[in-house]
Structure formats: C-alpha cells, structure tokens
Image: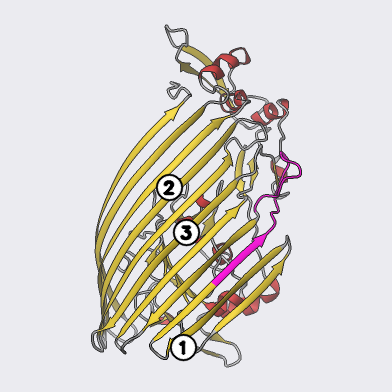
Amino acid sequence: MNRIPFKRTRFFAACAGLVGASMVPGYVAAQGMLEEVIVTAQKREQNLQDVPISVQAFTGEALAESGIKDVFDLQANAPGLQVNQSQNATTSNFSIRGIGTGGNNFGFESSVGLYVDGVYRARQSSMINQLVDIQSVDILRGPQGTLFGRNTLSGAIQFTTVKPDHDGSGFAEVSVGNYGLLNLSGAVSISAIEDVLAFRVTGFSSERDGYVKNLGLPGSDDINDRDRYGFRAQALWTPTEDLTVHAIADYAKLDEICCGSTVLFDNNRPDQRNIVGSAFVPNPAGGDDIELPFSTFGQLGTDSYLTSRGGTFIAENRRYDYKQAHSINPESQSEDQGLSIQVDYDIDDSYSLTSITAYREFESDDFIDADFTDLDALTDTNNAVQDQFSQELRLSFSGERLNVVVGASYFEQTLESRSQLDFGTETDFFAALFLNVDPGLLDLFNAIIFPPDGFAFDVNKQEHKSWAIFGQADYALTDTLTLTAGLRYSDEDKKLKQITLSLVMSQVFL
C-alpha cells in the first residue's frame, strides 16, 4: 500500500473577494487607488512594487482577515508555497515552486530559508506552530543567497513579529470551531521608560480533537488532533535616535497524535507487476548461504495477504473517508526555544550597521507504526536534539540611485538523533508484505532476517559549521530600469559520527 498524509484545508468562499483584495499590495477598493506597502525583502524598507524579485507579502491584518493561523493555512493563500507533513509533525517540510528539501533526514537543512525576526531556523518543523502577533510575512521566490548568508536555493520566507511600542497596544482573541477547536491568544506592550524602553509579551494555545479514525484501535483518540502552546517576550531599547537594541525570547511546545495517512493506491489491482528473484542469506548452521525465492507484489496482491492475516484493508476509493488502520496511534512531541539580540546603528543618513546574534534549541520525539497496518509488525521511535548559534553582521548604504548591502554570517549547530526500529510478534507478515517469500521457507526466513522482538538501533551525531560573505548592489539606471548584481561565498563543514546496533541480519544479497 502507498500512503499519503491526511490534510484538511479551509476554504473561505464567502470572503474570497475581500481576502483577494487584501492580498493585492495595498489595494483600497473604496478609494480606487493603490496604497504603498513596505516590505524588507532586500534587507531594507522598500515599496513592494519597487522590489525587483518575485515577492508575496502578507500584513498582519491580511493574515487575520484570511483566517491564517499557521503555515498550513498560509500555503492555501500563497501560490507556489507547499508545507507538507509525512509520518509525524517533526518531519514537516517546505517547498516553493515545487522545489524543497524532505524533512525525513534530520541532518539536512531546507533549500527554503526560514527566518523569524531575521534569525535563521535550521529545523523546518520548528515552524509548525501558531502564527500569532505577526506584523508581516514575506515569501521570496528563487535563490536569495546574495542577501541571506544561507544557501537558500528555492527561496526564503521571512516572518516578522510585532515589536514593542510605547502606546500600550495589545489584543486578546478567543476562537472556537468544530472538532472542539479552541484557540486562545493575546499580546500587550508595556512602556517602561517613555520613548526609551518598552516590553511586549505574547502568548497562545491551540487545542482541537482529531478527525482521523484508527480502525485498528477502536475507542482510541482520533488522529490529527492539536495540542500546542507558546509565548514570546520582547524588549526594545532605544537609548538614542541612532541606536536600537531588540531582544527576543520565545518558547513553543507541541504534543499531538499525528499524523494520519490514507491509501493512495491499493495492491488488489490486476496491473501490479510480478517480479521474481532470490535473496541470499547466511546459513545459521554454517556452510553456504541459503537462497530464498521471492516475488514482489504477488499475483493476489499484498493487501489480500494482509486480510488473510486478520489485518484491516482500506481500499483506495476510501481515500477521503478519514480512516486508517494502525496497531498504534502515531505520536509527535517537540519543544522549540531561543534567544536573539538585534542591534541597529545608523552611522549617518546613508550608512547603517546591523548585528543579529541568536541561540536556539529544538527537540523532538516521535513514535510511529512503521508498517502502516494494524498487525504487530514494526514500530519506530525517534528522538532528535538540535542546538544552533548564528551571528550575522550587515552594512547597508542607501543613496539616491545606488543601494548596497554587504555582510558576513556565521552558523554552527550540533545535531544528535536516536532511532530504534522494533519488530513485533508478526514480523513474518513484514517479510511476506515486501518479499512474498515462499510459505515453506517463511519461518526460516524470519528467524534469520526478521526475528520477533528484534530491533535495530542507531545513534547519529553531526557537527556543522559554516560561514559566508555576501553582498548585493542595486543601481537605478533610470526611473524604471535598475541593474542588480550580487555575490556570495560560503564554506560548509559537516562531521558525522554513527553507532549502529541490531539484532537482525543486515546483509541480504539479491
């Protein structure tokens, strides 16, 4: 069986005209004119219409009017952006224009750069939480390496939160929906020293029941529920007109039954191929290896074999019934936290200097049914821990026709993951499912390759350091024609250590 993750997409048909208007940069229907929308897609404030790259910008008001609560809602309103989840919440991934990096390998960074208040987020799944108290979201399509120190080949997404102010602004929001949805969020700014020091505190929580039934565990909680919360605390210090210091501390936690999957194609189909071959495995009694014949996708189909063993078969025509059959409910937990300090100094009317220093930690735990059936065959447990430090320094020049940004960035992270694959009491089904070993040799095959209660365990530790220098210059040849040139040099160094322990045979020669 091939499975794809369940998704639910909200569509606001009644508000399509209003939402569409809010997406158009500064569109004001009542006045019949275009209003200026300011973005920072090129590391400086610009009118969106003057930015010479493909950018889609969302203001905080547009996010609220469109009902966008997280990045999954965001993709429904941003053409070309895709946010996907696979077996669990912590293998989520982003892509722009169909190009992205899978989330199943914890050692990979995304080709879509993710930035929150100027800080690079190396873990894609750290963004799977609520979008609360957001000032703007900018989606930049195409390579952005000459303005961002990271190798963002597909594009970049910038999330900018609302800064503290001295006006005491804030909000409180409660929203409810079907499946027991309850969203709570709020924020408030506090002026400690008038025009000098201000604070802002933001908090949120989101709960919802699941909507995917697990037929393998009648009476259990439904899958794809929601249980997450977090906070953000900020301080903004402006001792002079030329100097600004902005500090942010944030924390977010997720603990959910995720993720449900559905059958894309079942195997009870006459067009399935029948491939015959042999597997050579060590002889436990010594001597020559044993040759075991097998065929993939036998003539009756592996789903028929699943049914014969007492398993639950879900046909592909029930793809949208929101039902699955697993022996366990998948579980996903994650914690994300960090601290950043941004210092901006205006040297004069033309030059400005920016420094962003940040430290972040991310940890995830996942427990999934690795055979995707309600037979006790395979389960997979994963724990991953990441910490990162980043430093970026930029110098900007703004003239009448020439604008220049040059900078340097440093990034380092430590990754450690532990994974254990456990075999249950019906691992012979696993062998038959993929190899359809001759029934007369099945017991011998499983005793060697898939022993009941066997396991495979591995620990991976990766150390990653990188640095880059980059720059971009824009020169306005005329009022309507601008020449842009950019350059980036980067150096990456990754070191990986791995320990593997298993109670299964790992060498099978086909």
Report whether 396 appears left or right of 39: left
Q: Compute the Cα span from label 2 to label 1.
A: 42 Å
Q: Which residue in the structure is indicated by mark 3?
A: 336
Question: What crowding class fits label 1: few (fewer than 14 Cα within 10 Å), some (14-19), or many (20 or more)?
Answer: some
Q: Which range of residues does the magenta coloring cover?
A: 203-224
Q: Is residue 77 magenta?
A: no
**Residue at point 29% right, 76% down?**
354
Going by the numbered disc 2, the residue's amino acid type is Phe
Q: Earlier in the sequence, mark 3 or mark 2?
A: 2
Colour pattern of the rendering = secondary structure
Disc marking residue 166: 1
Q: What's under tag 3, amino acid-wise?
A: Asp
Identify the mark nearer the N-term, 2 or 1.
2
Question: Pointer 2 and pointer 1: residues touching (CB < 8 Å)?
Answer: no
Labels 3 and 2 touching (C-beta < 8 A): no
**Label 3 to label 1, Cα distance in Å?**
29 Å
Identity of the residue drawn at 62% across and 25% down:
425
Q: Quadrant of residue 316?
A: top right
- Quick check: can you spot residue 382? yes
Camera-side residue of 44 and 16? 44
In the displayed structure image, the side of residue 8 where residue 333 appears, left or right: left
Query: Which SS type dominates the magenta stretch?
Result: loop
